[in-house]
Image (cartoon, grey):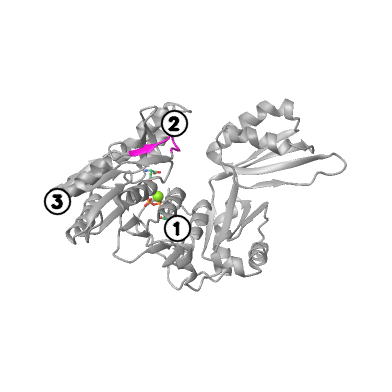
Amino acid sequence: RRTAVSLIVQKFGGSSVADAESIKRVAKRIVATRTAGNQVVVAVSAMGDTTDELIDLAHQVTPLPDPREMDMLLTTGERISMALLAMAIRSMGHDARSFTGSQAGMITDARHGAARIVDVTPVRVQEALDEGAIAIVAGFQGFNRDSRDITTLGRGGSDTTAVALAAALGADVCEIYTDVDGVFTADPRVVKKARKVDRVTAEEMLELAAAGAKVLHIRAVEFARRHGVTLHVRSSFTPHEGTWVVSGTEGETMEEPIITGVAGDLSEAKITVVGVPDTPGMAADIFTIVAETGANIDMIVQNVSTAATSRTDISFTLPKADGEKVLTALKATQPTLGFEALAYDDQIGKLSVVGGGMRTSAGVSAQLFTTLKNAGINMEMISTSEIRISVVIRADLLNDAVRAVHTAFGLDGDTDAVVYAGTGR
Ligand code: ADP
Ligand code: ASP
Ligand code: MG
């Protein structure tokens, strides 16, 4: 099917299309890519902080909005930006057509608010391309065939829309345009001296995304890796080359830095199940109940029970958004499971250092812990993977800790990082 013509998928995040002027600016950029002889498919996010504002609005109407209606509401954000962008391009004399997620063939499962893509059938997008038009697809949304309802892919999901389109259409590259010049060694809003990295392995990017670096949606990185989509993260405000997400084997040809980046995450809370009887199967029972709520847990810590009580505490972290329902579910089982109490703490922050070079170098944990010690910061939980170390600390100390660790690992650049737009919300 491939011809000499390149097919490029471009995704523009909310801060890149925050107002009419920005939409016109982005339209120019898209048209320039088209006029250079490429076929162009665009995935677009809702304007600015529209999604957050719609969520706030829903909560003013009811504390627990119905999930189906919530998806109906939130998908309107992307519908506004796709239509305006298509209008802007058409006014420049180029053919452009906008499509909702369902029109573009984004077929998902039925999980409202966290739907997963099960199939992509971009027939109408392909037709538009064949007729020489630019296709604009609403990000973050899909359609479930069984329920016949509109779904959303979860916050930040427009990145995944773009990658899924790139995979289905066999695009040459998927460009993720945002409000910073690429992937940095830390969030440039937190660390002024953060440096842009030219290349990051998919593996490192997955760990960084899971650790809270929201510059790329974790599922977009997974999807890209599985389907061999080339990802280029760059700024929509400058022509600068951004960050290429490369496969592990491509990564091996580089001299890998020990630490690629530091990430902070304030989106999690901690639940402690206090005084759990130390008998076989207790953890299984507790985490089965947690799993049934659909909540994704992150770290787990269990201590050896003290001989005197033969009881122990089990702590775990999870997204704050899931805290309420997990507490309710656990509370209901307290009489049968026989634990003493539940404690909920939403004032935690998670700091992670990520780097492929960690595999082959000793002492990274020691250096991290020493840095935190020198800053007078107490660690409450620790977890590691082959290429990541994460620690839970007090939320109000997180940003200072990220800066201290960034400096300690020699990641500070010579100049200040630039953030072109956005509110960081
Ligand atoms: P968009 O609206 O374009 O999807 P996002 O707000 O989702 O943009 O993601 C871009 C933001 O991610 C940046 O403005 C930055 O504050 C944040 N960020 C967090 N960690 C990193 C990192 N390591 N590198 C770059 N940006 C990061
Ligand atoms: N508009 C959605 C959000 O804010 C999706 C996205 O921007 O990726 O989460
Ligand atoms: Mg995003």
Q: Is label 2 in contact with label 1 (beta carbons under 8 Å)?
A: no
The answer to whether residue 295 shows anywhere in this view is yes
Could you tell whether 396 is left or right of 243 in the image? Answer: right
Q: Amino acid at mark 2?
A: His
Q: Residue 86: say if magenta.
A: no
Residue occupying the point 59% across, 66% down: 358
SS class, disc 3: loop
- For the question of whether residue 18 can be seen, the reply is no
Span of residues in magenta:
106-115
**Which residue does the image show at 37% across and 31% down from the upper left?**
145
Picture residue at 52% right of the left edge, 51% below the top: 210
- The image's mark for residue 94 is 3
In the rendered image, the vertical position of residue 105 relative to residue 92, given as above or below: above
- Label 2 CA crowd tier, 10 Å (few <14, some 14–19, many 20+): few
Q: Amino acid at mark 3?
A: His
Q: Amino acid at mark 1?
A: Arg
> Is 55 in front, or is 172?
172
**Structural distance between the alpha carbons of marks 3 and 2:** 40 Å
The residue lying at 63 percent from left, 56 percent from top is: 384
Q: Is residue 114 magenta?
A: yes
What kind of secondary structure does the magenta stretch mostly adopt?
loop
Residue on which the image places disc 2: 59
Under tag 2, what secondary structure? Answer: helix
Sequence order check, earlier mark of 3 and 1: 3
Give the Cα separation between the discs numbered 3 and 1.
37 Å
Q: Is mark 1 within 8 Å of ligand 1?
A: yes
* Mark 2 CB lies closer than 8 A to ligand 2: no
Q: Provide the residue designation for mark 1.
A: 189
Whole-number angstrom distance, CA of label 2 to CA of label 1: 28 Å
Classify residue 1 as left or right of residue 183: left
